[in-house]
Amino acid sequence: MIVERFVSWCETASSTQRVQGTKLLVRALSEGRVPDAERKAADEAMLRLAQDPSTAVRRALAEAVAESDCASDAVVSTLARDVDSVAAPILATSLRLAETDLIDHFADGSARTRAAILDRPRLSIRLCAAIAELSTPDEAARLLAHPAARIAVTTLARLAERHGDASDVRGGLLARADLPVATRQTLILASGAALQSCGLVIHSLGGQKAQRLTAEACEKATAILADSAGPQENTALVEHLLQSDQLSVALLLRFVCDGQLDIFSHALARLAGVSEARVRPILAEGRARPFASIAARAGLPEACVPLFISAIEIWREIAETGEPVAASRVPERMMKRLAKDDEAATGTGGLTAAMAFLRQLARGASAPVFKRTGSAGVLAQAS
């Protein structure tokens, strides 16, 4: 009876009066003051209000039921499909919207309604994955900043692929402790590409020099990343570098010169198509001819083999003595040995390119100081 009188009253009430009446009806329902016998009539009244010609009335209803469980699914669904000002409160708060509904609304919504979904108190794994596929860079950054968003590692990787060129997204990703090492390396490339395309950098250095310096910086950052990762992560990193065609001779040499022989042994085994158990003893014992054979199977240039062997020999000596050593000292020792060997063999300086690369490593070695346990662990483990 009470609800019937409310419906009759709405037919002649002004929009301002209907707004107030809507709030009173929802409050009465939320507080349980509507008799059970009139509950069905109350649901029908709210459905009529959800179709009211006044946007103000519909918005008042949406705001009132958004945080309440008193509205039916039909009412909530109707409001969620309304104009932005009506739909936004429902999309931001209502618990009656299913995950699939939220995904559909994000896919088809406006910037305002999508922002409302991103403002929800919690975002599920599946919803986050959908947002990652559909988002703009700004929306992706908001997703990463959400304190209760459940973002899977595969979704993080997808965000890096789609929006790695956006600085806010890169920052949000790199700030996460759960970011996989392969995704971090993707962001290194994205940062390098952004730097390389910067007009100021190009104007200051020139296109070719900017490209070269950026490539060197990315290689160095990748080596630092590998040094901080564990064995399992480095396995994933090697696969990522291989699939993205980044596992270059220069990067492998940087790994060896930095004493990162764990990732180097895995990479060499993967390139050669042999087991790592076969590679590790060769590195540990410093066997030059077997190493040359493995290097050939891995597709490494024959001219580079002496560089690898020289670095491995130096790290074997460090592993045996246990001496602390600055990373920059390894390329310096290699330059001295290679220069001496080259002069003895030819009397000329035939290693100009190699020397230039080693000087670069000596100037900006990736890791500061290694000890026996950190620098040549693979040698100690295999021997």
Image (cartoon, grey):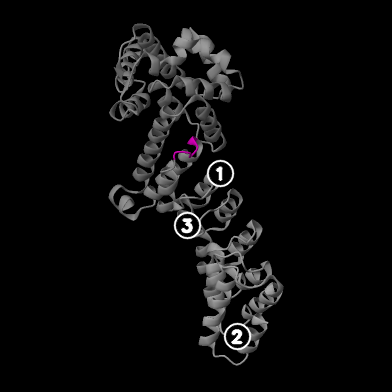
Viewer-nearest of discs 2 and 3:
2
Q: CA distance from mark 1 to mark 2?
A: 43 Å
Marker count (numbered):
3
Residue type beneath disc 3:
Pro
Residue 185, x across and y down, in percent = 46, 38
Q: Crowding near pointer 3: few (<14 within 10 Å), some, many (20+)?
A: some
Q: Which mark is residue 383?
A: none
Secondary element type, mark 1 = loop
Q: Main secondary structure of the magenta part?
A: loop
Cβ–Cβ under 8 Å for marks 3 and 1:
no
In the rendered view, would you say 235 is above or below 209? above
Residues in magenta? 177-181
Q: Residue at 60% across / 93% down in the picture?
A: 12
The residue to which callout 3 is attached is 137
Cβ–Cβ under 8 Å for marks 1 and 2:
no
Viewer-nearest of discs 1 and 2:
2
Q: Nearer the viewer, residue 288 or 158?
A: 158
In the rendered view, would you say 256 is above or below 225? above
Viewer-nearest of discs 3 and 1:
1
The residue to which callout 1 is attached is 152
Q: Residue at 59% across / 60% down in the picture?
A: 95
Residue 173, x across and y down, in percent = 45, 46
Residue 245, x across and y down, in percent = 53, 36
Residue type beneath disc 2:
Pro
Q: CA distance from mark 3 to mark 1?
A: 18 Å
Locate the N terminus and report the quarter of the image it occupies: bottom right
Q: Is residue 35 left or right of residue 167?
A: right
The residue to which callout 2 is attached is 53
Q: Residue at 31% across / 16% down in the picture?
A: 333
Q: Which circle's residue, 1 or 2, is located before the other in the chain?
A: 2
Q: CA distance from mark 2 to mark 3?
A: 37 Å
Q: Nearer the viewer, residue 303 or 198?
A: 198
